[in-house]
Image (cartoon, rainbow, N blue to C red):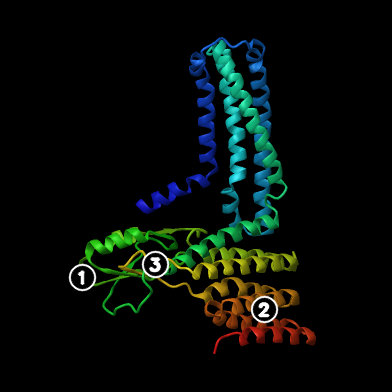
Amino acid sequence: MILALRKYISRLPEKIWFRAMLFSVGAIAAAAAAEWVGPMIPYEADLELASGSVGDILTILASSMLAVIAFSVSIMVSAYGSATNTATPRTIALMLADDRSQNALSTFLGTFLFSIVGIIGLSAGYYDDRGRVILFFATIAVIVIITGTLINWIQQLSTFGRMNDLIGRVEQATSKALRWHGEHPFLATQPPVEIPEKARPVRCDIASGVVTSVDMKRLEETAEKHGVTVYLAIHPGKLVYPARPLLYLSGGDADAVDPQPFRDAILVEHDRSFAQDPRFGLVVLSEIASRALSPAVNDPGTAISVLDSGLRCFEVYAQACSSPEEPRYVRVHGPEIDMADLFTDFFIKIARDGAGIVEVQQRIQLCLLALARSWPDIFSAAASDASRNALARALEAIVYKPDIKDLKERSQRVVDSRPT
């Protein structure tokens, strides 16, 4: 429950309603504070015309912002639908967390509420002459903010929800997760070792779901408290069910330890997330490519763009692996990312759906060659297996002999790059 609450709080900035609420509260406070700030002015301001016209300005703002909010919401909903139909529904979470669209919608809503509160205050005689002057200058400041937000929002609308925008968002989220795992191998714990035969399994006590987060600090503290060693059997993104062990306990009086605190350190939810699960990002990228390669769409260019994005993601991981941080937790042995699984999630699925498209198969072999030659210790083994797999699929679908010969030569270069 604590881990779920902490994750919920950490996700609040990604919620549209949360940022809109903050902007709205700030706008209402600004409009209400004008009367309190007025008496602090040490002189009489000679701005009767300006302060008298503030009501008209606020009325214009209120009516225009209501229209802008309705327009913006319709545009965002349309973009979400377009992303679902052209890419994959899994990209919606990244679009909902977009900072610029949230800031725009929140600013528009905050301006609307600022105007409404200001109009109500003026109609009720809440402001004196000084308060009206302060409200006038606050309105001018709001107009400046709205102008900048509108310019930024118009620029955002030119790319929001487009294919390149969606691929870029998924690439950024995937690269972030892969970079963290490269810098913190084994989830910042000790390397995996063989689990003792008498180690006690701790199984999932709820319905099946997906591991989205592991609180390593809490696992370490609980293990230290009971004098046991923890062997994690799962990784973020793994499907768990009541019969599957989450971890194993060994040492001390492991059989008498209450397993619930260890279970509470592992958050199981219904849907995967990009945060600690790099495989999910690669799966989403491959889904975009698969949709593009479907007969109904037939867009190999998008699949090639996805392959280039995936290549950059793996490069980020390799660069992060070159300078890993020291393990933070000594009583926990974490799992290792299987590079073969990552390549299967990404390259093999695209190779399957693009088996008969020569340019896609060529780009797959080129990306595998780039990884195998640039970082052979990390990628060469998995790249060789993926290259053979992709070639086998292509040979069943491509009949033109020069293309077959070219793909065989490309695949052989990938295989030859594997250290002997």
For this orientation, the residue located farthest to the front is: 42
Give the residue pinned by disc 2: 365
Looking at marks 2 and 3 on the same chain, the residue that comes earlier in the sequence is marked by 3
In this orientation, does residue 1 appear?
no
The amino acid beneath tag 3 is: Glu
Q: Count neighbours of disc 3 (C-alpha within 10 A) and say few if under 14, some if 14 to 19, many if 20 or more.
A: few
- Alpha carbon separation for disc pair 2 and 3: 35 Å
The amino acid beneath tag 1 is: Gly
Looking at marks 1 and 2 on the same chain, the residue that comes earlier in the sequence is marked by 1
Is residue 37 positioned above or below 395 on the image? above
Q: Count neighbours of disc 2 (C-alpha within 10 A) and say few if under 14, some if 14 to 19, many if 20 or more.
A: many
Is residue 33 positioned above or below 92 on the image? above
* Comparing labels 2 and 3, the label whose residue is closer to the camera: 3
Give the residue pinned by disc 3: 326
Looking at marks 1 and 3 on the same chain, the residue that comes earlier in the sequence is marked by 1
The amino acid beneath tag 2 is: Gln
Residue 333 in percent (x, y) is at 35, 71
In the figure, residue 417 lies in which quadrant? bottom right
Name the secondary structure under disc 1.
Answer: loop
Name the secondary structure under disc 2.
Answer: helix
For this orientation, the residue located farthest to the bottom is: 420
Q: Which residue is at the front of the view, 163 or 334?
A: 334
Give the residue pinned by disc 1: 252
Residue 322 in percent (x, y) is at 50, 71
Residue plotted at (50% across, 18% down):
37
